[in-house]
Image (spheres, helix red, strand yellow):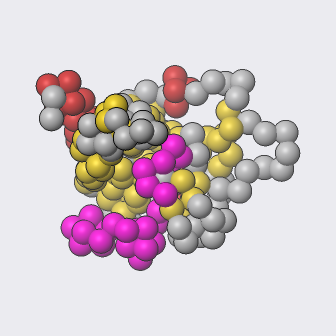
Amino acid sequence: MTTEQAGARAAFERRVDALRGLRVLAVDYWDLRTSGPEPDWDHGDWHRAVLGVQLTTAAGPVTVTWDATFQPYGVAVFSEPVARHLDPDESQRVGPGAGSRWDAFLGQSIRAATGRWDTLTFGPATTWDGQVVAPKRDVHLPTALRLDFEAGPVWFVAGVPRSPEGDEILIPGDEIILVFTAAMMRAMGYVDPTFAT
């Protein structure tokens, strides 16, 4: 791991640690602006926030989104409004509303916050005639974030659903998927019992 990568990882971990103790008052999902029907974000055990989530806390806004800090895409956390990470002409708030899975968590403090780091191997990249243009490399990136509340855990995953049912999620990906059950996390491939229980 390079010094730059170690610094980025340490900064991510500091932002995650800062979530502990924050009381969540409201939650907003953001998606691309569309002139068609309202985007479908509620899939029962999982929600699709696409561009990111803003948690309104008693201490101010927190954004959970995805970015390419660790290449290709991973979960990102910022102690600022989601608007700083979106183009207002191309994005819109899409949910959740009253009666969502979030009702059980609103007004509660985050008891624990844990990032999930995974290692992906890329390459080697070759030309059509077999010349290596990029060596094989391992990339360490945060693919998920777990927030624990008195009501239970909520996971934020950098992934993309490959089907409307969400029975196949490509991880990592350039969307934020929120998961409300350990069974769904395990179905997505998170089998570590300390993270997906």
- The residue located at (15%, 29%) in the rendering is 2
Task: Please identify the quarter of the rendering in which residue 131 is found.
Answer: top left
Point out the stretch of residues depicted in magenta.
170-197
Magenta stretch holds residue 181: yes
Tell me: 36 left or right of 4: right
Residue in front for this viewpoint, 175 or 72:
72
- The residue located at (36%, 50%) in the rendering is 143
- Name, please, the residue furthest toward the front: 129
Instruction: Give percent across and percent down for residue 39.
Output: 73, 51
108 shown above or below 125: below
Query: Can the viewer see residue 109 in this picture?
Result: no
Instruction: Give percent across and percent down for residue 34.
Output: 78, 39
Task: Please identify the quarter of the rendering in which residue 122 is found.
Answer: top left
From the image, which quarter does the C terminus lie in?
Answer: bottom left
Tell me: 74 left or right of 82: left
- The residue located at (52%, 26%) in the rendering is 85
Tell me: 140 left or right of 32: left
- Identify the main secondary structure in magenta: loop
Query: Can the viewer see residue 166 in this picture?
Result: yes
Residue in front for this viewpoint, 65 or 170:
170
Instruction: Give percent across and percent down for residue 36.
Output: 85, 45
Magenta stretch holds residue 43: no
Instruction: Give percent across and percent down for residue 91.
Output: 67, 33
- The residue located at (57%, 67%) in the rendering is 166
Tell me: 20 left or right of 79: left
144 shown above or below 74: below
